[in-house]
Amino acid sequence: MRPKAEVLRGLGSDRVMVIHSEDGLDEFSVEAGL
């Protein structure tokens, strides 16, 4: 995940959210842990 965040910073992004889950899925959900 760090390389992706560093690229976004290098491109001038001020605020980003780089997330991943333990099961490897690329979906973000507030219900994921329930």
Image: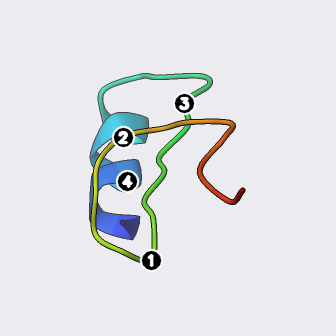
Give the total number of marks visible in the rendering: 4
Q: What element carries label 2?
A: loop
Instruction: Tell me whether circle 3 and circle 2 mark residues in contact (CB < 8 Å).
Output: no
Q: Nearer the viewer, residue 6 or 33?
A: 33
Q: Which of marks 3 and 2 is in front?
A: 2
Q: Name the residue under label 1.
A: 22
Numbered circle sitting on residue 6? 4
Q: Nearer the viewer, mark 4 or mark 3?
A: 3
Position in image of residue 18 (x %, y %) = 47, 46
Q: If the image is split into quadrants, where does the N terminus sit?
A: bottom left
Which three-letter amino acid code belongs to the residue tagged 1?
Glu
In this rendering, the answer to whether 19 lies above or below 23 is above
* Residue drawn at x 29%, y 48% as measured from the top left: 26
Which three-letter amino acid code belongs to the residue tagged 4?
Glu
Position in image of residue 7 (x %, y %) = 27, 46
Q: Is mark 3 on a helix, strand or loop?
A: loop
Distance from the alpha carbon under mark 4 to that under mark 1: 21 Å
Q: Nearer the viewer, mark 4 or mark 2?
A: 2
Q: Mark 3 points at which residue?
A: 16
Q: Earlier in the sequence, mark 1 or mark 2?
A: 1
Q: Is mark 1 on a helix, strand or loop?
A: loop
Distance from the alpha carbon under mark 1 to that under mark 2: 11 Å
* Residue drawn at x 40%, y 51% as measured from the top left: 5
Q: Mark 2 points at which residue?
A: 27
